[in-house]
Amino acid sequence: MINGKEKLIVAIDTDDFDKAKELIDQLEDSVDIFKVGLEQYVATKGRTVEYLREKGKKVFLDLKFHDIPNTMKSAVKAAIKDNVWMMTIHVSDFEGMRQCAEIAKQEAERLNIEKPIIVGVTVLTSLSNEDLQDIGCNMTTEELAIKRAKLAKKSGIDATEIIYENENDIIEHKEEKIKFTRNVVIIGVCLLIYWMILLLSFEKDKKYILEDIDEDYLFNKYNPMIAGCIQGSRDILSRDIIAVILNLIEKKNIKLEIKDQINKGRVYLILKVPEKENEMDTIEKYVYDWIFNGKEIVELSDRLEKIPKEKDANEKFEQLNKMVEMRLSKMGANKKSVPIALRKFNIFLFVISILVVIRHIIFNGINNMSMAKSMTILMIILFAMIGIITALLNIVIIIRHQINKIVQRITGQRVVTTTISLVTLFGVIMIITAIIAPGSYLIADEFLICAATILVLTDNLMLKNNVNMIEDYSKLNTLKYKLKNSLLSDKDIEHVVLWEKYLAYAVSFGISKKIIEKIGKLNLDDDLTKLINDKDILEYLTSDYYIFYTYASPDRRFLNSYNETLEKAASSMSDSSSGNGGSFSGGGGFSGGGGSRRRWRSILRRKK
């Protein structure tokens, strides 16, 4: 039976050897085991350990050895020579612990002494969850302690039963966390599968390529803008504006004149034809009035460049889109196809997804360090230099525009554009999360929110045609197919005379490059051929008039306004501080004398 002296361990918490001796002498008859810590050992140069050994006391050497395996093994071997009864090592790696346990056994047998007890220190009590996050460990202190304790058990060191009492609870809770996170991902995947089923069921009618179509019927019934929207099941695109202009030129509603000017070289003028204005439909008339802007004659290239830069360009574009939507609705084209009941159910799924995410975050516990890091990054962004903020805004807009540009060259469908934009946005958020907190459960939450958001934002964008429009839908897709693959390829005179009409519709269908290449092989010599071979006009055609989005989009206008405000503020600061020594533009100040305004403007001015 163990007596009281063998149960009690007294820590010698002093760096003074004389005081240590005094304590040992006072407790000599009551205590057999004394703990010597790192501070005491270093301060007394090990003399206290020697004194305890002389007194016949057991030494608990609490130095927490932590080094490479070979060095730790040597330290344990040296401690055994001092007849240490128990010692501590850090539970860091399996091999180091294994070698320590092995050398302890070997040395004890060699010296014919009792093998010392080796206790593994799993996690220092001073470490918090935040500290672990700082060094890249995404476990709690309890989880790390359990993991290391299990590793220590396998290594063969002693005191393997000295583990958290709630070990099983911790392990079980961690497994529940992993299971919950896995379920969140599964829910997100299920939502995406459900969304894909909706796409297959409600997004667009099946395309049929017909053997023969009446092109005149299509040309008379649908202007290029309407035709492009029906064929692509989409909203209007900026390229449709050019398509309508080309069609009006072909129909002689707009007159094209080419003039050679001394300073500008060859210019392409378009003139109003008042007597034919009543022949245009409302959409064509809207584009007609927009392009001429109250004038009787305009230079086409110059006008196409200026339209996107006008303050009301985006508003006019939205109004034009509404007019087209109304026309399509009356025709029975591009109708929202997902039933209202399903859309309401999708909203319900979105709400449930948000609740699941909230529950998941609460269950896992909010990681304070992750939040702190996130807040730090946010504060850095908010209080960063103006130039950096402007650069970030430009980068975001450029990325979004490039995505839209790629999508719209293939299709202008809102479902595709919205989906890719959302995936890109949440993809960036997930990457940032992975960098800030590798392995974080928040990535699963972000994935679920992304899937739920795609579902709820795109179900009302899925479009189909009424029964009476399905045939025309197939005819327009057949026209696009033939324009892209066969028309004008054999120089058939019947098709050649219609090339101007084909060009307008090809622009709206997004295949202008293909048709222009074919037209070039016809060796035609007329004004419209010269027009499309003009460098500036050709750029507008082959880029789908994407310059419109570069200048007219709401985010670009916001950035322009933002830059203008900053420039005015910088100018005001420069004016108010002019001449004040040591200020922004005074002697020895920010710009060294009056150069502040110019420098600010050079930084903030957007590249034209």
Image (spheres, rainbow, N blue to C red):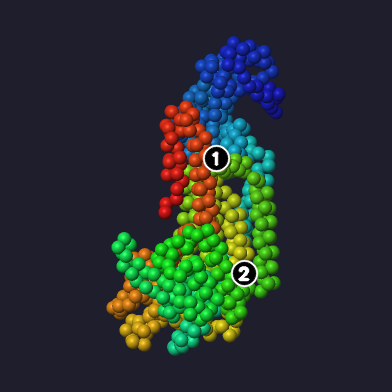
* Label 2 residue SS: helix
Q: Residue at 67%, 19% (x, y): give it.
A: 31
Tell me if mark 2 has few (under 14), some (14-19) or many (20+) residues whose alpha carbon lies within 10 angstroms of its own: some
Query: In the displayed structure, does residue 398 sit left or right of residue 338?
Result: left
Q: How far from the left and from the top, in percent, is residue 18?
A: 59, 10
Foreground residue among 99 and 432: 432
Alpha carbon separation for disc pair 2 and 1: 39 Å
Mark sitting on residue 383 = 1
Looking at marks 2 and 1 on the same chain, the residue that comes earlier in the sequence is marked by 1
Foreground residue among 88 and 200: 200
Residue 607, placed above or below residue 33:
below
Q: How far from the left and from the top, in percent, is residue 507?
A: 43, 73
Residue 54, placed above or below residue 512:
above
In the rendered image, the quadrant that contains the N terminus is top right
Q: How far from the left and from the top, in percent, is residue 263?
A: 31, 60
Q: Residue at 55%, 65% (x, y): give it.
A: 316
* Label 1 residue SS: loop
Foreground residue among 598 and 119: 598
Say which amino acid is labelled 1. Answer: Phe
Foreground residue among 513 and 245: 245
Q: Residue at 53%, 85% (x, y): give it.
A: 471
Residue 250, placed above or below residue 267:
below
Q: Residue at 58%, 21% (x, y): give it.
A: 36
Say which amino acid is labelled 2. Answer: Asn
In the picture of the structure, the residue carrying the numbered disc 2 is: 460
